[in-house]
Amino acid sequence: MSGAAEVEDVYSAIEESAQLLNVPCSRDKVWPILAAFEPFEGGIIFSASAGERYAGDLDLTVQVPRRIGDPYAHALSNGLVTKTDHPVGALLSDIQERCSVNEYLIDFGVVGGFSKIYVHFPRDVQGVSKLADIPSMPGAVAENADFFARHGLDDVAMIAIDYQHRTMNLYFPMPTGLEQKAIVSMLRDLGLPEPEEQLLESARKTFRVYFTLGWDSSKIERVSFARSLDLPVIRDRVEPEIERFVTGTPYTYPGERFSISIVKWSPDGEWFNVGSYYQFGPLQWEVLRKILK
């Protein structure tokens, strides 16, 4: 199959998924991003957020092909991001100098455009203290080192760099999930109210917990718990189109569709994100297979 045909197939799947969410999808806006990051050798994930404040977009996470060694420079050269003197613009190159990266992924919204680069290194996990020493890393990482240590969080397997919001995420793998009391303790330490029992039970089965930090504050802005789709829990807490989306998006692999749900807590409250895998990359499948066995 030619590269052009692959782009067309993926774009068609995006259009179909956007329709499930009642989100407008412009070929003129989406196609340049797809064309810049084809061929599609690995994972592709469709995701959406629930709640009026976060709704209105369909997000795509796409694995960066091997031909692109520096996805940030590539995004700059394709006019997808704007060059900046802010430390967010130097973070990827600083990580590359210090970590053995296994793969990169990008994130973009069909409405919001290019937003993030994910730096994935599950075969060479990094400790919080080592990451805190990276020159362009937010000071909030070092300033929260005691929090991470207190909760047994050290092995970071992925970092997301959000160029739109000038924040970043640290992703900690949780191969055996978390105890409810550990989740409650984290939320209390962050000054967040104790959640309802059903949400705690759902979050307990997380395979990845991640924290959002920025350069403008020492505070952890958000904590998120990702797990395989927990439809009974989210069904009554999200809009009907979110359920329609996460159970109806197209996918390319045999068997059942694999989807995830994420509960997020911040001082502004709680909300949900859902994701549906359109295509698996070899490393993604390897990591998930170990977690979900």
Image (tube, grey):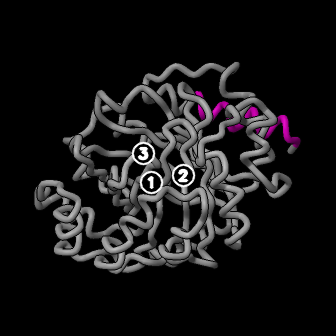
Does the stretch in magenta take in 9?
A: yes
User: Whole-percent x and y of residue 222?
Assistant: 33, 51
Compared to 291, does 239 lie above or below?
above
Give the left or right position of residue 230, taking residue 27 as reference: left
Q: Residue furthest right?
A: 2
Residue 270 locus on image (x, y percent): 23, 46
Q: Nearer the viewer, residue 84 or 36?
A: 84
Q: Which mark is residue 259?
A: 1
In the displayed structure image, the side of residue 65 where residue 20 appears, left or right: left
Q: Is residue 291 left or right of residue 11?
A: left
Q: How many marks?
A: 3
The image quadrant of residue 191 is: bottom left
The image position of residue 48, as x and y in percent, is: 43, 39
97 in magenta: no
Q: Secondary structure at mark 1?
A: strand
Q: Identify the residue position indicated by label 2 in the image.
A: 277
What range of the chain is rendered magenta?
Answer: 2-15
**Residue positioned 41% across, 61% down in the render:** 210
Judge whether 80 appears above or below 163 on screen: above
**Residue toward you, 203 or 113:** 113
Going 43% across and 28% down the picture, which residue do you hit? 21
Q: Name which residue lies at 51% across and 28% down.
A: 18
Would you say 154 lies left or right of 108 here?
A: left
Measured in 3D between alpha carbons, the distance from the residue under mark 2 to the one under mark 1, in whole angstroms, is 6 Å
Say if residue 107 shows up in the picture: yes
- Disc with the residue nearer the chain's start (1 vs 3): 3
Residue at image mark 3: 216
Cα–Cα span, label 3 and label 2: 33 Å
Distance of label 1 from label 3 (alpha carbons): 34 Å
Q: Give whichever of 194, 87 is nearer the camera.
A: 87
Looking at the picture, which amino acid does disc 2 mark? Tyr
